[in-house]
Each structure stands twice: as structure tokens, then as C-alpha cells.
Amino acid sequence: MDENTQNFLEFWKTYTWPEPKPVSYRLYYTDAGEPVVYSMEDLPGKYIEVTAAQYQEHSYRVRVVDNKLVKQPLNLITTKKLVPSDIGTACDPADITIVTDTYPNQKWKLKKYDHS
């Protein structure tokens, strides 16, 4: 064997591989417990660890309650409505389709209603 081959083989005998990072399945969610995104990455925001099966299912018909994943019933109907608010997107007081930061303005937020 030549010297280069010997050095190469010696390197691989003594090389120590770094420990792999543990796999982490996460569901990121809002303050209201609504799912935002399933990810294996470390992203900013609130998250809970989910099982590989829950991650693979990738269901958005869930809520996070007390740091636990709770499935929503299939007959649950969610409706959304814009409601006036002190926080949210500022719009022209006469036309909600015009977004503006000028004063006066009316702020709106999206409110969800769950019912069956």
C-alpha cells in the first residue's frame, strides 16, 4: 500500500462520528391553541412535541389545550368573522378594504366561532 492509502485508512480507523441530534416532531400553535405548522425544525413560537404518527397524520383539525393535542370532532363547524378591535389590522373607517396607518382608523381582528 502506498503512503496516501495508508493515511486514508488510518484516518477512518481513528475518526469519531458526531452524535446525531435526536429527532423531534413539533406542532407550532397560536396563543389560542390553533395549529400553525408541523415541523422538525427549531422555529420561533410555541410548540408541543408530537408523536411520529401524529406528525405523519399532519391534521389541522386539532387544538392544543393544556400542552396536549386534542382532536376536534368531525362535525365541528368553524366560522370566522371580522370584528372591531383595539389591536389588529388598521383600515379606513369608511371602507374595510383599504388598509391604512393614518388616523382615524378602525382596527379589525379575525374571530373564530366553533359550533356543531
Image (spheres, helix red, strand yellow):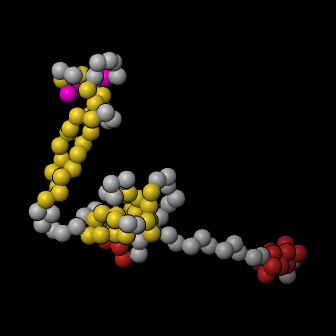
Q: Position of residue 21 (x, y in %)?
A: 60, 70
Q: Position of residue 23 (x, y in %)?
A: 52, 72
User: Residue lying furthest right in this view?
Assistant: 3
Q: Position of residue 82 (x, y in %)?
A: 20, 39
Choose between 69 and 51: the one closer to the eye.
69
Residue 108 seen by the camera: yes
User: Residue 67 colored magenta?
Assistant: no
Q: Position of residue 105 (x, y in %)?
A: 28, 22
Residue 56 seen by the camera: no
User: Is 75 placed left or right of 47 in the picture?
Assistant: left
Q: Quadrant of the C terminus?
A: bottom left
User: Is 15 placed left or right of 66 in the picture?
Assistant: right
- Identified at 23% across, 34% down, the residue is 84
Q: Quadrant of residue 16?
A: bottom right
Q: Quadrant of the N terminus?
A: bottom right
**Magenta residues, as a range?**
96-100
Choose between 52 and 90: the one closer to the eye.
90
User: Is 44 placed above or below 48 here?
Assistant: above
- Identified at 24% across, 42% down, the residue is 110
From the image, give the main secondary structure of the stretch colored magenta: strand
